Amino acid sequence: MRGVLLDLDGVLYVGDEPVPGSAGVVDWLSRERVPFRYLTNTTSRPRQAIVDKLTGMGIPATTDQVLTPAVAAVAWLRHHGIERPALFVPDATAAEFAGLDPVPADADDGAGAVVVGDLGDGWDFATLNRAFGLLMSDAGPPLIALGLTRYWRAGDGLRLDAGPFVRALEYAAGRTAVVLGKPDPAFYGTAVESLDLAPDEVVMVGDDVRTDVEGAQRAGLTGVLVRTGKFSPSDLAGDVLPDVVIDSIADLPRWWAEA
């Protein structure tokens, strides 16, 4: 093991509260010269806002260390020469796509792609139906999913993430989304490449047994599950077997030394 990928919400912090010991673990990674990246499916804020949140909790971070689905999606769209995306993401995240000249927020046609992220309370029938209508247009734009996370833990409990809305659009439109976030192997591959390591040299630490652990394992990484965030004891009784289970991120250095 030579490198580490760290999920954010549920691992380093829960809501607006840091997990005890998380800042110390990141300091330990830096002292031991273990290359790492922050890997998140968060689509409710841009990278700089994520960096500001981490540093505000005493966790050092730079934008280059943060890999988000929005960053991957912009790169994918540019690679395929696609502009004018229709964005179903929060305004702060939409700023990441500014260089692609997105269609207006109320547009019913003319989209080069339909990009779906965690719109949160912005979802209603009219909004979901507009995304469906764009997909069914004669142009047949691709459906871009900024991750397939099912839910996350907020301060007031569990909340739906982007995954359920992506699946609804896939079912209604008879399409398969291009997934540019966890658990897609290509997303993990991009993160591993940024560390200049091989997949079997990298550990993914997350609180979601499906998106973080199973997704990482399918990409050839070691999947470490923490008992914080959205973790539930039932996660250990399913068909996904984490390579390692630790109580929290604070236990990573001890496990690393023992392993």
Image (cartoon, grey):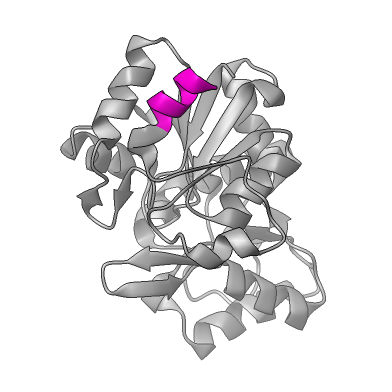
Extreme residue in the front direction: 258
* Residue drawn at the location 37% of the way across and 43% of the way down: 248
Which region shows up in magenta?
252-259
How many circles with numbers are drawn on the protein? 0
Dividing the picture into quadrants, the one containing residue 219 is top right
Q: Residue 67, can we see it?
A: yes
Q: Nearer the viewer, residue 221 or 91?
A: 221
Magenta stretch, overall SS: helix
* Residue drawn at the location 47% of the way across and 86% of the way down: 124
Image quarter where the C terminus lies is top right
Q: Position of residue 9 (x, y in %)?
A: 37, 51
Q: Is residue 5 magenta?
A: no
Q: Position of residue 191 (x, y in %)?
A: 59, 30
Q: Residue 148, can we see it?
A: no
* Residue drawn at the location 47% of the way across and 45% of the way down: 40
- The answer to whether residue 108 is above or below residue 103 is below
Q: Position of residue 162 (x, y in %)?
A: 54, 66
Q: Is residue 245 left or right of residue 216?
A: left
- The answer to whether residue 48 is above or below residue 65 is below
Image quarter where the N terminus lies is top right
Q: Position of residue 57 (x, y in %)?
A: 19, 39
Q: Nearer the viewer, residue 236 or 34?
A: 236
